[in-house]
Amino acid sequence: MKRLLVVAPVAMTLSLGLVLTGCGGGSSSTPPPPPPSITSFTASATSITDGLSATLTGVFANGTGIITPGNLPAASGAAVTVSPTANTTYTLTVTPTTGTAVTATATITVNPAPTITSFGANSATITTGSSSTLTPVFANGTGVITPGNLTATSGVGVSVSPTETTTYILTVTNPSNTAITSTAIVTVASATVSSVTVDLLSSGPAVTNKLLGMNMAIWFDVVSNQSAVVSALQSAGITQVRWPGGSDSDLYHWKTDSMCDNGYVDTNDTFTNFVNDIATPANLDVALTANYGSNTACTAGGDPSEAADWATAALAAGVTPSHITVGNEEYGSWEYDLHPIKNDPTTYASSVIGTSGYYSLIKAASPSTLVGVVVDAGNPTNTWDSIVMTNAKGSYDFVEYHYYPEAPGQEDDTFLVQQAAQELTTNINTVKSELAAWGTPNTPIYVGEIGGPYSNPGKQSWSITQGLYAGQVLGEMMNAGVSRLTWWIGFGNCNGTNGNDSTSVYGWQNFGAYNVFSDGSTDDPTCPGAGPLGTMSPTARAFQLFSQMAVNGQKVLTATVGGDTTDVRAYAATNPNGTAVLLFNDNENLAQLVTVALSGKRSSSSVTVTTYDKATYDLSGSPTGTPPDPVGTNTWAAPAVNSMGAQALPLDLTLTPWSMNIVIIQ
């Protein structure tokens, strides 16, 4: 009994095991595959503009996808690009290996592209308080005119009454949200019609192209940047250059291309390289600033023999320095000076005179070079001018004057545009009075440095406002008979965002610079909006415009303004092509209607007007296409040229807001 009880469970266990392993005679089958499914099928845009594309994306499983029409293979989650030309319903079909396919659809509506046939004002120029009618003609969309968000209907006029010159933008948007634009400018002019009368029988000072000058610096690589620098200078009409200029002149030693006080000099900026790479290929007249502040050992004041040797080396290099000035702004405490008595007019004059002084030694080395001294235009805080002019009389061929009318952080557009250039003329007249009082009348005056703020420039420096100031400076100095002018500075002095970039001054950019040509993003990335190397700022454009007037052998003519004498400024000179008239509108918002008359002349065979204005500058602000340039196509645009052909005189012109205009009347 015990044995049977033990064996029976074992037999049962074995039997159960055989059943579980399928050995009991049962059968097996493969389950059917899951059916195809589509989670989603969508278009990236349910409507598009004719000629554009959209994408279709299906999310599906358990089958192969095809999109029709087009029999386009589809993978789950992958976008497929389609470009329908008419309203189209697309079908995604997912087919399994066996069984029934499933489908989903997505519809794309195709809308015609919006078009604008015309958009203009019936009165492109109105006076303050008047109206103009804008008429748009367009199709395939909804129209809106800005500013004002005015609803536009095709063919229906919209009345506008701007208080200042305004660019209106018509935007037409179709149901697919594709938009196109067109612009119309309504110029708002002062109700006052001003007159400009040019006396062709007058005879003012001789015109000189030596007003078209730039300073260049010893820290800007003139070798690597040679081609762009030369091209920019020539394009702007620059005829002469001052080297090395600035306060570095009193630390710089040309033989070793080095500076005292651990100052920086670019290793490529040897005087020889400057001559060979810049001055000679650009055909520039060269003025040098002799080191008055330090000797070569940097232990005492400047050595006149170093300046004389420089003149000799210049001649050997093929350049005759037309001017050499003794030192920079020696009257200022900021100027580097290792003489026992620093920045002292008596010490300065003593170094100029005598057989071993700057004047005699430089003239002995280069007899045709003019040697000059620095003046301070009768600064009431010191007696620099009177002592230097008295003590150095007979040992200077010209005087050099510098002018910076603004303090950093205190820039004022109204002052700069309407008063600063005229203030410079007042200072030049002061220098003339001093020269007459010291018995040296008619001594040439050289404006060696000029700019806006004396340091730390902000966005005003690359704004239309400084351009207007620069243009008027050139006209004023021409009228004053100034012999030479060099702006501070051509290249190499971007100031980035360090200066006044606030809304207190006009300008779209957020950088400032002393230099009036762009240094380019490679040399100085802190002024990225200044454009490629050599791009002209509005100040450089002023020189470019003035180059049409600054023609050697011509003479200044008297130009008299009647009417709005605050906003309208005029300068005139004879010209190889007839008469050149330089006109400014110093009003930010209003155009100026001007009648230009030439005494005794009733017609012209040809009139050409070249204009650089606020609108041109404003359009320079958007290489990416954001406002103020709606399309981003006019980055740092050149002046506009209007060839008017034959005209009766007097000539009626409209000067756009904040504009400088050179008019050549044949």
Image (spheres, rainbow, N blue to C red):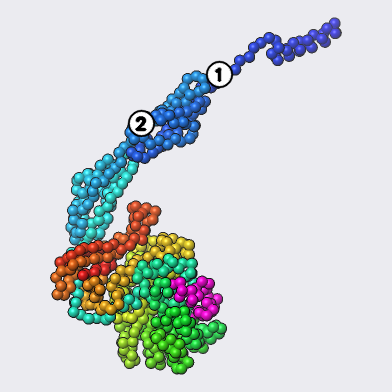
Residue 489 lies, in percent from the top left, at: 41, 72
Judge whether 300 appears above or below 226 on screen. below
In the foreground, 2 or 131: 131
Query: Bounds of the magenta span?
Result: 250-279
Measured in 3D between alpha carbons, the distance from the residue under mark 1 to the one under mark 2, in whole angstroms, is: 36 Å
Look at 25% across and 56% down and name the residue there: 185
The N terminus is located in which quarter?
top right
Which residue lies at the image location 39% right of the left edge and 53% below the top edge?
A: 624
Q: Which residue is mark 1?
A: 32
Label 2 neighbourhood size at 10 Å, few (<14), some (14-19), many (20+)? some
Q: Which residue position holds label 2?
A: 88
Residue pushed farthest bottom?
A: 355
Task: Give the x, y percent position of residue 117.
Answer: 24, 46
Q: What's the residue at 41%, 30% (across, down)?
A: 70
Magenta segment includes 273: yes
- Mark 1 and 2 residues: CB-CB less than 8 Å, in contact? no
- Location of the C terminus by quadrant is bottom left
**Disc 1, SS:** loop
Picture coordinates of residue 519, whole percent (x, y)? 44, 65
Q: Residue furthest right?
A: 2
Q: Is residue 383 visible?
A: no
